[in-house]
Amino acid sequence: MTTHRLQGAIGTVAAVQQYGNGWLVDTTCLFPSGKVIQVLIEGTDAEAVVSDAGMTLDELAVSGIVPDDGTAALARYARQMGIQARNGQIFESRVSVEDIPAVIRLVASAAQEAARNLMHNLRPRPSRHIRDMLEGFIQTKYDSLFEKAVLEGKNKSHQFDYVHVSKANVIAINPVTRDASSRDSRIVSCLDVKSKMGEKFQPVLVYDESEDWSGDEIGMLQLAASAVPFGSIEIALPDLLH
Amino acid sequence: MRTGDVDQFLDTQKTLSGVPRWQAGSRGNQFRIVWPLLIRGIAPIDGPRLEVVYAANAPHLRLSVSLNLPPVIIRADIDPTGVHTNKKPLKPNIPREIRGNNCHLWSDNRPAKAGSAVPVSLGVARPLPAEYANWPAALHWVCAQGHIMLHDAAVPPLPPRSTLL
């Protein structure tokens, strides 16, 4: 390899193409999908505007993510790079031609950070609902064994979706989601009934393992109940019933 | 959401529910269509939908059509100036870099291991055949890939392009 050959090969890293009245420049940053982040340069040598041309919010939109206030969602990431967000775009204005390379990096980095974080934080809910999945499973396999019931706890009564009472024990199954208030409420219910009924009470919390549960969160469930991923319920339930 | 759920969903015949309308997106000059899917006559809450995102401020046609469960499992991107980089390991016939229109197929992005979680982003793309790089051909292409029945009469024209640039 020679310097000349290398320069030729990497010359396309910052390829420039005409885009309306401005120029679209490739950067070395990527959106999570693998799309190369490009910046738009408009204006004059003395006062150029460097922006993401709204492509960060477009990238989120094509992933099904539409923030309520797009500009506000971008502003934090623009500020971190010392630039601005307005009208749904990350940009910097009054850029001299000498400063354009540095500002390209700042705009592209802000766009990359914003897309990565917003995609993670605003990710749409999966369409698989644990309550529906569990209901389908129980109805198909164990419908006659379980019924909805209210069990008395030490402090108050609690409703469980699927309860099976035998001489040996009381098995109570509830679905649980990652939503903190729902999860905590399920844990409290199990603990409260357990404190009244003792070891005879065997609560089971069924969660959707595709929801990115952390080990800590599952550990919290296990403080109160047997935590069973939905994918294992078919194996776990026969064991609990015998 | 697991790969098996997506496979099963794709195998099921689906139709589109209601009349699609362009609505404002998350920034000026961004327009969207969200078109719920009917599966066995039901459109579930937060269920699968066809989505279109159109950037009306671009100097050329720039739009994406996707099938969103969520997450998005198939997408066609019409963007003649866009660039996509595929990461290693590269599958056969998948180029390292694509300049211009591209598409993201479930078959290219499906994790090989059975029962794996569905990826949040469709990282693997291939060039979109030229005959589908227009509206509404891209919509027809996504519908065909996703086994969605589409009635031509229901497809609305693109909103007027902005002259802000």
Image: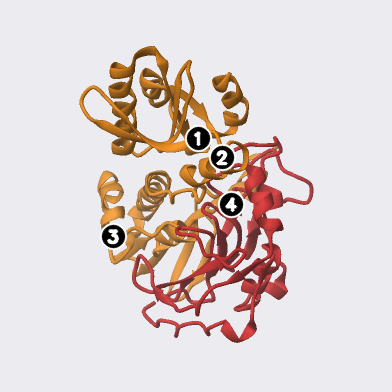
Chain colours: A orange, B red
- Identify whether A97 is placed above or below B53: above
Q: Are marks 1 and 4 in contact (CB under 8 Å)?
A: no
State the image coordinates of residue A6 (x, y, percent, origin top left). Answer: 64, 43
Provide the chain ID for the residue under circle 4: A
Q: Indicate the secondary structure of the residue bearing disc 2.
A: loop
Question: Of tags 1 and 3, which is closer to the observer?
Answer: 1
Q: Residues within 10 Å of mark 2 (few under 14, many from 20)?
A: few
Q: Are marks 2 and 4 in contact (CB under 8 Å)?
A: no
As measured in the structure, the alpha-carbon distance from the residue carrying label 1 to the one carrying label 3 is: 50 Å
As measured in the structure, the alpha-carbon distance from the residue carrying label 1 to the one carrying label 4 is: 68 Å
Question: Of tags 2 and 3, which is closer to the observer?
Answer: 2
The quadrant the C terminus of chain B occupies is: bottom left
Provide the chain ID for the residue under circle 3: A
Q: Are marks 1 and 2 in contact (CB under 8 Å)?
A: yes
Identify the mark nearer the N-term, 3 or 4: 4
Q: Indicate the secondary structure of the residue bearing disc 3.
A: helix
Q: Residues within 10 Å of mark 4 (few under 14, many from 20)?
A: few
Q: Do tags 2 and 4 sit on the same chain?
A: yes
Q: Which residue is mark 2?
A: A143
- Identify whether A59 is placed above or below A20: above
State the image coordinates of residue A227 (x, y, percent, origin top left). Answer: 46, 24
The quadrant the N terminus of chain B occupies is: top right
Q: Which residue is mark 4?
A: A11
State the image coordinates of residue A114 (x, y, percent, origin top left). Answer: 37, 48
Determine which of the numbered discs, if any, sits on residue A197 in the image: none
